[in-house]
Amino acid sequence: MSGAEVIGLISGLISIIGAAKAVYDAAADTKGQPEEFRQVAARLPLVIRLLDSAKAGVPKLNATEQEALETILQSCEDKAESLEKLFRRVIRKDDDKWYERYKKAVVAVTKGKKVESLMGEILKDVQVIMCDKLKEVATSDQVKELGEAIKEMKELPSSLAEETGSVNQTHSGSGDNIAHKGSGSIYAGKAHHNQPTGNVVYGSSSIKYVTKNYNVPQDTNSENQTCLRDLRTTDPREDKKRIQDTKGGILKDSYTWVLENFIFRQWHDDKHSQLLWIRGDPGKGKTMLLCGIIDKLKETASTASASSSCLLSYFFCQATDGRINSATAVLRGLIYLLADQQPALLKHVRKKYDSTGKELFVDTNAWFALSEIFINILQDPSLGITYVIIDALDECVTGLQQLLQFIDRTSPVCPRVKWIVSSRNWPSIEEQLRMSDQKFQLRLELNQDSISTAVSMYIEHKVGELAKRKKYNAKLEYSVREYLSLNADATFLWVALVLKELETIDRRNTLTRVRAIPPGLGPLYERMMAQVSESNNADICKRILAIVAVVKRPVTLRELVSLDDTLHELECPENLSDDVEDLVQTVGQCGSFLTIRDSTVYFVHQSAKDFLLQETISQELFRSGIGEVNHAIFSRSLQLMSMTLQRDVYSLRAPGITIGQVEQPDPDPLALVRYSCLYWVDHLLEYQSREDIINDLRDSGPVHSFLCQCFIYWLEALSLLRSVSEGVVMIQKLEDLLFDSGPDLHDFIHDARRFAISTRSIIEQAPLQVYCSALIFAPEKSIVRKTFEDCIPSWIQTKPKVETYWNATLQVLEGHTRSVTSVAFSRDGKQIVSGSHDATIRLWDAATGKQVLPALKGHIDSVASVAFSTDGRQIVSGSDDKTIRLWDVSTGKQVLPALEGHTTWVTSVAFSADGRQIVSGSDDKTVRLWDAATGKQVLPTLEGHIDRVTSIAFSTDGKQIVSGSRDATIRLWDAATGKQVLPALEGHTTWVTSIAFSTDGKQIVSGSRDDTIRLWDATTGKQVLPVLWGHRSSVTSVAFSTDGKQIVSGSWDKTVRLWDAATGKQVLPALLGHRSLVTSVAFSPDGKQIVSESDDKTVYRWDAATGQLLLPALEGHTGAVTSAAFSRDGKHFPTLHVSDYWLVEGSTKLLWLPTNYRPSCEATWGGIVALGHLSGGLSVLELQQRPKLVT
């Protein structure tokens, strides 16, 4: 933690407390405000003054003290946010009964904390912050006033009856709970805490860094469990058990040889040896060898003393299972196992998870976030010797190169971590692992004698078991053992497959059959395939093998039997159980290629699947091509879902029940269609026949019919399967596929994508809101709404007036706590970066709207400008703190120390096209050029403007820089020499606020506070078109589309406008939606989307091709609606109210309110609720009092 970061935390805390004070001040003259709030509000200026003073003393603290201070600041920030929320909920400019509001707000916002207890805890935290070294910067009167304030808060009468909840000082996050008595200072540390089990530490002098074990509060336990559940894609312990059981158990004698192997011992005993790579051909027993090593290392870990604790984490890759065949899945499994064993390690996950949720593990940057988390865990000081084991690297289908590079890079920098990996003999793996003195290879082929001995022990044991079961005589047992020993070629898998076949052979035919089995895996697989072809069930066996070979993950017996007409007739559900039993027998006849474990069908080994997909074999298995099997699975999936999916499939009934409250019923109605719900689009994409795709995507065809019948039920099912984001991606894939589809289907899918994107967040939280909030707030002409209008619950009698069509807003991205100042797309259009007055930078996934990383913190004042490098790997930001900072997109870490040189705030920053240089403009009237690799200034400062530089940009070729200024001029500079290329471009009558080059570098666009946009020739400096008029207030931001044909602008008038760059005409009506001035605009690289940021703290995404937003009816207010009430003769219905974005009756959640419908005030009369909005609109809903069920 740097001093700058600590100062940033203090600044953020001041902002929050200042916001709370502003809320109170706005209503301070209103009668009837609670006395306790007046007392608390009176202390806020003192807190702000002390914190402001503390910033000056931070550089005096050493690194340990700064890190300890971080913990207290974060705790104080949490309490300050709760206080501000409490103020916002309770203090209003009306005479309604605040006490009832206050009780509800205390429960909803602060988990029982009263306003005076929150203020008391904040004051105590400030006392801790003002340690000896920081007290020097505060006046004696301030220190005295702080002590008196703490005393007064303790003596203040309780603002609520005791049954409202006890008031205990609790502390969440990382850091000790602080208790302070008398004089002296307080110790702070890093530990989860609440009610210490050891001694609370008191002391003298300054803050000291200590570590204590504390009991984790119950709510923290619950949050940890939720985080673990979201992290888990599999439990490797269960995978290990499944593998061992599938292979008939582990034989100790088959792996003990490796424990005494010279290379293994060298790796194990030498503390400088980090990596052991066990390599060998298929079937040599690598997986079972690792299972044995894991068991041995577990014994070591269990006998280790407390002072030399030992942890073990492992993962088994499996190419045929999409859940466990990627690099991200490997890291998720390893982290899960470590955190489950040592919960304190979960803090490294929670640092990112708490701000992003489950998307942290699945979004575009999941790998980068997980790799950083894993390194932080491996470098945790509490970690002792740790063994990390990864089996079957060759079966890591996605991201293998990333994983190998990670292992190679990480193993040398984590000396307490020892790695074992296994794989086939792939040169690409050897090249990436870069073997060295600290890395060892154990080649199974070079240990033939040891492997042969182990295989012989395996044969001895397994044949002995078989002989007992089949009642072999001694001679027959000896003959079988001898044949296997002579032909095994040190291959466990060959032996296991032969033994599996002998299980089905009568004793009298055993010797004849075993001698007919050829040595070698390849010949054995060929013989197995020949047996399948010659069997009575040849066709059905081949069909099963074909399906299992193309599915995206191992399927259950019930899923498999449902995926093909020959296995089960959907029209005869009463036969399902019998068909599953028949399937079990038929799988046993598939030549030992398949095995069944926990009612799930697997390939016996990856080499078996590889064999079946060889061209010569696949022609026999897929006679009509693999595409036909994919088409059959796709078609069958649509049938299955159409027959199974329905409204409220789990019979939840309550519309507000959250996904965390859902319990899977037994039997599970979705058991047969889980696979189909998640993969039907993937199988559609893998057709090999364009004609089939066109046929299925015609109007009224299979896809269109399914969507019209079941789309909204499918979304509900995806929510129950916790896969709504995957559904959004599937819809996008469908839209991308519509090359020759019918117009009706095209319109439906386009509407479905808008519907899914705009409602994703609430459907993920509460499955049944898809029928409530999602439908009633969709536009009147939405195809999905019109198709499924009958699904809206009957108790919603009067629906709110909504827009007629989807507006141009694709998504609203919320997260910043103060107004947003700058926004930019990455070059590939997949990410959006935003900067804000809250001093943070946030990175968003452009497809899902999810925040990709925790907020990037480092600036200690407002962020004025942000930009992506061309390759999308870095972000540059400029701030009012006079610095420029460079950030790594994958980790969120700062790449270089802050770039310093400007003498006042930085107003604008930009990357050159090659990413090698950064240009910045400042309030100090100068332009500076920086080397992006070193942070050094490249040229002398560029001077010429006579007032603040407001905007800056590079030409695409990097040869020129353009700057706009408060002096109303635009200047063009040579990037190599720093010389001005042309005389100043003049025309604007006041500030130039924004400028941009066209992609070809031939034109410059500028926006100004004179409300106009101007287009300039970059070669001559002449104005190209007449002035572009349209905005009714200052233009704040302008940008060119990539093809240079369009210009987008944002303004103080709250609108976004789109212009034709050739004619200067406005292309669309103004895009309306923001509730405050638009601060920044940008095009996506493909020109199809526009992103805009506003002072209302939101980021909007717009479809550049569509029309205007039609405002809801009941308009007329020209400003924010601040109060709403029904006439006094109306029937008051006090239990109906808005809480945390929900319309709630009593404690029952009924209806979630989207962003544009969240009220600034509300009133109820009977079952009618009126919601007033900041935009000046009013929404009215009428609800039937009972029943409030979704059906």
Image: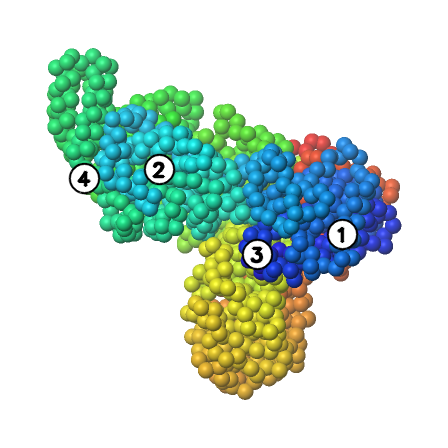
Local SS, label 4: helix
Indicate which disc, 3 or 2, sits on the residue closer to the N terminus. Answer: 3
Q: Nearer the viewer, mark 4 or mark 3?
A: 3
Residue type (three-letter) at the residue carrying disc 1:
Leu
Mark 4–mark 1 distance (CA, rounded to whole Å): 75 Å
Is residue 642 placed above or below 153 in the rendered structure?
above
Mark 2 residue type: Phe
Q: What's the amino acid at mark 3?
A: Asn
- CA distance for labels 3 and 2: 44 Å
Residue at screen point 25% across, 33% down: 260
Q: CA distance from mark 3 to mark 1?
A: 25 Å
**Camera-nearest label, 3 or 1:** 3
Element class at badge 3 = loop
**Residue linked to disc 3:** 62
Q: Earlier along the polypeptide chain: callout 3 or callout 1?
A: 3
Does residue 723 show up?
no
Q: Which residue is most to the bottom?
A: 983
The colour scheme used here is: rainbow
Mark 1, Cα crowd under 10 Å, few <14 / some 14-19 / many 20+, is many
| Numbered tag placed on residue 1139 in the rendering | none
Mark 4 residue type: Glu
Q: Badges 3 and 1: C-beta atoms under 8 Å apart?
A: no
